[in-house]
Image: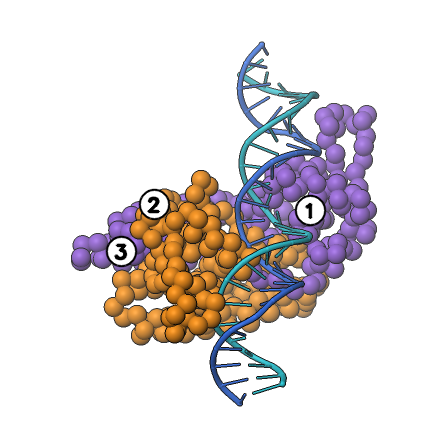
Chain colours: A orange, B purple, C blue, D cyan
Amino acid sequence: MRKTNKTHCAILGMLSISPMSGYEIRQTIQESTANFWSESDGQLYPALAALMKLGLIAYQATKSNPTNARNKKVYRITPQGKKALQQWLQQEAETHITRNEFMLKLFFGANISPEINLAHIQNYHYQTKSRLSKLTETQQQLTKEHKDSPHLPYWMMSLDYGIQLTKTQLTWCENAMRALSKMDTGS
Amino acid sequence: MRKTNKTHCAILGMLSISPMSGYEIRQTIQESTANFWSESDGQLYPALAALMKLGLIAYQATKSNPTNARNKKVYRITPQGKKALQQWLQQEAETHITRNEFMLKLFFGANISPEINLAHIQNYHYQTKSRLSKLTETQQQLTKEHKDSPHLPYWMMSLDYGIQLTKTQLTWCENAMRALSKMDTGS
DNA sequence: TCGCACATGTAACGCGTTACATGATTAC
DNA sequence: GTAATCATGTAACGCGTTACATGTGCGA
């Protein structure tokens, strides 16, 4: 891991929770970290192969295992893998500016009519509301299902981050919509 | 523009505000949209060349111009470019999950000590505070310098978005730090 | 004259998605 | 038997950053 590959780190992290197949890793990422992390197939499977080569993960090729009838490979993290994960976790995260196409369009909004900008914000508001309800749902589920897990406090913190930010976005939308509808009738 | 290149759109948007050189476009992006958009040299200059070929932008190659003594090319948007920009602005923005390494690390925080996680959040809090002060500064500047610009209301909206989110992040940090220091002494 | 800001551009590399390709198992 | 889901993987392409390469003009 010369220049730490973040897909590698995400996989190691997921396997630190429990052994999983590639397919299950993808699902878990989609369900639990959807709000701040995603991985695609084209990244995931090559990364698993690379981590195998590095000896950071391993899997049981148990053909006879009845729960493993398909071509499924259940990966687990190795001691070296755990060490590499911890090393990465101890380093400060790099912050990089994330592109937000919605905001960029709004920034150039003066080039089109206020009505269209308003419609865009309404749509964004709608999507944000549905994201919020998914997040609160996940929050309730996790609290029930992982009561005694050492991971729970950290999962709650990251979920809360998403929830607080999403709520702020909703409030912003409401203010922006009000401002734009005034412009609309005003001119 | 088969599959709309967003760097192209950002450049067209910037040139819709005023004619600029590549260097000035980069600076303007860094100053004004830093919170939600960035471009690097490796994207910008090839994109300018491509937009020229498409006839969406143009520049005056005035060697005799005294304000243009260097190898500077001042680009302006063409009528076709303006049309392309408006077409893009009218389309709904694609929302895609943005990767947040800081959150990913926190999610896996149980693998390392609460102390280190706490230190990470303290650092994040510090960085966020400085980001907030830059944003409010920009807000005041823009209000003064572009009082009568039709762009101002949109610029204010996008700035306010950044400010509100950043404030929420600060509050979240404070709560998370409190929660973590309790864990610290508790175990 | 020396260093910084201005100014443009290219090459190499890694990131990330989408579409493609394949096939097994399960539920209807 | 047939559709959905489980399951793994590859290829092509475009996105994006970093480092490199080059040169000008201005102020101390």
Q: Position of residue B72 (x, y in %)?
A: 72, 31
How far apart marks 3 and 1 lie (CA) works out to 44 Å
How far apart marks 2 and 3 lie (CA) works out to 20 Å
Foreground pick, A62 / B180: A62
Residue B74 is drawn in which quadrant?
top right
Q: Residue at x 39, y 73 (%)?
A: A67
Query: Looking at the image, do the residues carrying marks 2 and 3 touch, with CB atoms under 8 Å apart?
Result: no
Q: Is residue A187 above or below residue B57?
A: below
D18 sits left or right of A155 in the view: right
Residue A58 is drawn in which quadrant?
bottom left
Q: Residue at x 75, y 44 (%)?
A: B50
**Residue A3 shows in the view:** yes
Quadrant, the C terminus of chain A: bottom right
A118 sits left or right of A138 in the view: right
Q: Which mark is residue B135?
A: none
Kindly identify which chain the residue marked by label 3 belongs to: B
Q: Secondary structure at mark 3?
A: helix
Q: Which mark is residue A87?
A: 2
Around disc 2, counting alpha carbons within 10 Å, would you say few (fewer than 14), some (14 to 19), or many (20 or more)? few
Dots 2 and 3 on the same chain: no
